[in-house]
Image (cartoon, rainbow, N blue to C red):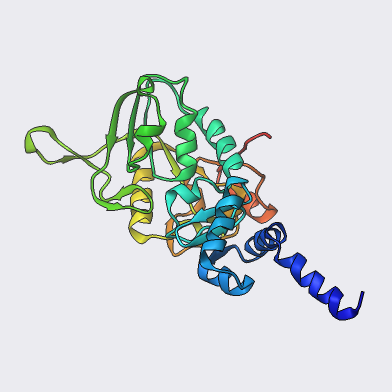
Amino acid sequence: MTSSTATDAGSTARRLPAGRKAELAAYVAEVGEVTVAQLADRFDVSADTIRRDLDALDADGVLIRTHGGAVSTSAIPRPDTGLDVRMRLQTTAKERIGALAATLVHDGSAIVVNAGTTTLALARHLADHSDLTIATNSLRLATEIAPKVYRDLYVFGGAVRASAQATVGPVRLPALAGGPELDIRCDLAIIGVGAVAVDAGYSTSNLAEAQMMGDMMDRAARVAVLADSSKFGRRLFAQIADLGRADYLVTDVAPPHDLHDALRARDVEVLVAAD
């Protein structure tokens, strides 16, 4: 076989669908987030071909299909990434965190829970609880939790953030008969955050959400922050609270030494979910 023939054969092999999809999957894993147009240009195929490849790779669990592209299963999502996509990232860690956080909830107690994928995992693990009073800004939580679990379920009003399937507004509830808004007090606030760092405390990407989450903390006797290990050492736009505002940090992996020492110095109990 001549050198030219060998080169042509190699080129043909690379363009076989299986080979292309393997290269495509590796590229998405490397870059983290891509568009259909970017992939079509890189692999010199049509956009429809790329869409079929992405659909197949999504079905195999290799990546996550998004509107107009795909993200790696290990990618840290952008602030505006939709809830349904974020629910498929770090799923094992979130389920473990949710199961452990559920052990902090006592039957008959009142809890306030912010919107997020990790707190939705918590909701699924409250199946054996009863007589709870739950207040939340999550529009999705009611579909994730069994009605037998709670005595009352309240959703805070405010502006709707469609990407997060959540409301953003004051941590108060309207009184009956058109009276003034009522302040609330809860036994436990369960707050999923976007980042945890020694210098920045707990933070998230949206200023209004950060204020709402901080208000939730202020209305609870105890505070549990939920964060998987991908959130450690990161700092996002809006600070929610200092590290010491939480009573518990519930996570899937022990924090790095500097963060662990900072949490301990502020009397925050670190709870690590077992494998």
Location of the C terminus by quadrant is top right
Residue furthest to the right:
1
Comparing 220 with 139, the one in front is: 139
Q: Position of residue 191 (x, y in %)?
A: 44, 43
Q: Quadrant of residue 154?
A: top left
Numbered-mark total: 0
261 vs 182: above or below: below
Residue 76 visible from this viewpoint: no
Q: Quadrant of residue 209?
A: bottom left
Location of the N terminus by quadrant is bottom right
Comparing 9 with 265, the one in front is: 9
240 vs 122: above or below: below
Q: Position of residue 149 (x, y in %)?
A: 39, 22
31 vs 133: above or below: below
Comparing 175 with 89, the one in front is: 89
Q: Is residue 123 left or right of residue 273?
A: left
Residue at 58%, 48% in the rendered image: 263
Q: Position of residue 77 (x, y in %)?
A: 52, 58
Comparing 56 with 100, the one in front is: 56
Residue at 44%, 23% in the rendered image: 106
Residue at 38%, 49% in the rendered image: 213
